[in-house]
């Protein structure tokens, strides 16, 4: 056990071995091998990280925008140069394929590159002589110590949606990655320090609910960003808001994709294969519901035949289409939902249970699974399964499809495949979902546009990335100023004269 590496904390610019007695094994999902041990930081260690970031804020907030931008520029270069190394660690701890892991690093890089332009986005407003001799202007100032809490499924991309823009705005940051695959997240944080972030500007603590709750409750934390499940996100938002801080919580999803009969058949079906089964379905933006409209219902057998050809293997196989699920518990949960789908009357047209990968018999593998004739109210439709399980719903019209999607409590992402501009326009105007794709299967926007969401998929007014992130990580201060050589007459009214 002594040969297994212990994941350190990152406090005050140094890697620190935790003094905790509570450790969690980090497991390779393809082999069940223990590849690292992660600490659940002690209350004193979390307090130390917060206090350190609070002290660092005093000087970091005064560092010029130009200097912060240059640090982000160097960070982007380092992240790009270390993509292969990070992807290998990510694949080992998470299980996703190497090409998918490399793609995640690239999407995280977008968030860093967005932060490079933050000095332009942080501009305020100015109105000279708004009233007689009076100028009024806004400035966007940092909040202080901020915090981020992320799920296991994107240990590189998700933190890059948080701390780069937050620290570029002049805040300091305490980050808690998932305890299931923490090493890639820590590597990213180390690269940010190597790029020039001063000690204390970015600290990393590991742990479970107790650490997360401390970040939500602590009076020195001014804002919390969370990406993960609805159950956890609702509690994070409640605790943070009750503690008087701002919070954004991007939560659960049940994403639908609509295929119209006029769609490009090959493009639509192949896109759905990746959207439903890529990353073994462990994406909050995965398409887990396929809505076939009218004559497109006849394409289902073709889709199933294509799904059968997808390759399930260990993530290091570059020809693999999907790797293992994150844990045995995740596999058990997904297979349990498959059985519920059968028991509740859905038609199982492709069963992904029982997949065996030679040499990796202990892996958490579940193959592509497809249910047809799924109805609202079935467990496989109501739950976010977070696995390679696709529910197919059959409707007659686009209007029925939109009504069906809008009746779902979640509103994270959706897409439509069509060659009819009228269909696309109707869909984008009437569907109540945050991210909409038109002939795009997973509509995660580029990082200089905000990641949004509606209804049960999001709590908080402002989302990650884009212009919304600038306002989330700053406080707008409005100054009304008069510079006058001689005193004015007494004015006892509210009017500016």
Image: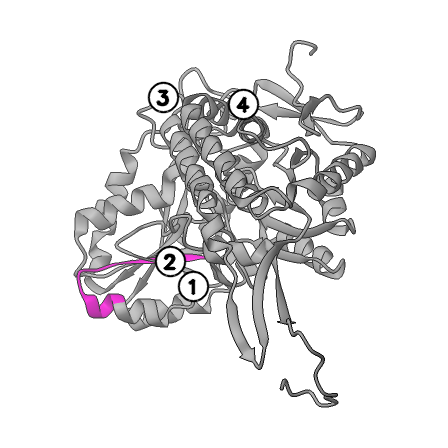
Image location (x, y in percent) of residue 363:
49, 24
Secondary structure of the residue carrying tag 3 is: loop
Residue at mark 4: 28
Provide the residue span drawn in magenta: 412-424
> Dots 1 and 2: beta carbons under 8 Å?
yes
Residue 416 highlighted magenta (yes or no): yes
Secondary structure of the residue carrying tag 4 is: loop
Work out whether residue 139 or residue 456 is closer to the camera in this orientation and state it. 139
What residue do we see at 53% from left, 28% from top? 195
Between the C-alphas of marks 3 and 2, the distance is 30 Å
Residue 396 highlighted magenta (yes or no): no
What residue do we see at 45% from left, 38% from top? 108
Among numbered discs 1 and 2, the one appearing first in the sequence: 2
Could you tell me which quadrant the C terminus lies in?
A: bottom right
> Dots 4 and 2: beta carbons under 8 Å?
no
Residue at mark 3: 317
- For marks 1 and 3, give the one nearer the viewer: 1
Is residue 449 shown above or below 197?
Answer: below
Between the C-alphas of marks 4 and 2, the distance is 32 Å
Secondary structure of the residue carrying tag 1 is: loop
Could you tell me which quadrant the N terminus lies in?
A: top right
Residue at mark 1: 433
Between the C-alphas of marks 1 and 3, the distance is 35 Å
> Dots 1 and 3: beta carbons under 8 Å?
no
Among numbered discs 4 and 2, the one appearing first in the sequence: 4
Between the C-alphas of marks 4 and 3, the distance is 15 Å
Residue at mark 2: 414
What residue do we see at 61% from left, 36% from top? 178
């Amino acid at each position: 056990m002594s040969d297994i590496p212990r994941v350190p904390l990152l406090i005050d610019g140094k890697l620190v071995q935790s003094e905790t007695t509570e450790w969690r094994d980090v497991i390779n999902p393809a082999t069940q091998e223990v590849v690292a041990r992660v600490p659940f930081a002690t209350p004193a260690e979390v307090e130390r990280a917060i206090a350190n970031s609070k002290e660092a804020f005093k000087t970091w907030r005064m560092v010029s925008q130009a200097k912060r931008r240059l640090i982000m520029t160097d960070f982007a270069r380092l992240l790009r140069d270390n993509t292969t190394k990070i992807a290998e660690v990510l694949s080992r701890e998470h299980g996703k394929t190497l090409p998918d892991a490399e793609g995640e690093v690239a999407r995280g890089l977008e968030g860093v590159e967005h932060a490079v332009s933050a000095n332009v986005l942080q501009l305020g407003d100015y109105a000279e002589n708004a009233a007689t001799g009076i100028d009024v202007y806004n400035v966007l100032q940092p909040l202080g110590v901020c915090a981020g809490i992320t799920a296991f499924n994107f240990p590189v991309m998700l933190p890059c949606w948080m701390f780069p823009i937050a620290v570029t705005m002049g805040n300091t940051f305490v980050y808690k990655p998932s305890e299931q695959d923490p090493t890639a997240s820590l590597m990213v944080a180390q690269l940010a320090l190597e790029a020039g972030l001063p000690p204390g500007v970015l600290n990393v603590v590991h742990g479970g609910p107790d650490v997360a709750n401390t970040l939500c409750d602590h009076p020195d934390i001014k804002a919390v960003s969370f990406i993960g499940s609805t159950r956890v996100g609702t509690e994070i938002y409640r605790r943070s808001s009750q503690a008087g801080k701002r919070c954004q919580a991007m939560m659960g999803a049940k994403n639908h994709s609509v295929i119209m009969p006029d769609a490009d058949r090959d493009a639509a079906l192949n896109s759905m294969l990746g959207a439903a089964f890529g990353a073994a379905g462990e994406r909050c933006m995965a398409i887990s519901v396929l809505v076939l409209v009218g004559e497109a219902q006849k394409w289902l057998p073709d889709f199933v035949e294509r799904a059968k050809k997808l390759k399930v293997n260990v993530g290091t196989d570059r020809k693999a289409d999907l790797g293992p699920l994150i844990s045995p518990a995740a596999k058990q949960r997904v297979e349990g939902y498959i059985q519920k789908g059968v028991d509740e009357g859905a038609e199982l047209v492709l069963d992904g249970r029982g997949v065996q990968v030679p040499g990796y018999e202990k892996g958490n593998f579940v193959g592509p699974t497809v249910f047809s004739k799924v109805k609202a109210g079935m467990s496989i439709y109501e739950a976010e399964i977070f696995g390679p399980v696709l529910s197919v719903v059959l409707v007659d019209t686009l209007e029925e499809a939109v009504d069906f999607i809008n009746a779902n409590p979640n509103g994270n992402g959706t897409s439509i495949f069509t060659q009819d501009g009228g269909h696309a326009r109707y869909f984008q105007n009437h569907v109540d979902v945050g991210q909409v794709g038109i002939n795009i299967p997973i509509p995660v926007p580029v990082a200089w546009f905000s990641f949004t969401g509606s209804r049960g998929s999001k709590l908080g007014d402002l989302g990650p990335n884009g212009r919304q992130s600038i306002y989330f990580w700053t406080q707008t201060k409005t100054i009304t100023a008069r510079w006058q050589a001689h005193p004015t007459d007494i004015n006892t009214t509210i009017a500016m004269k």
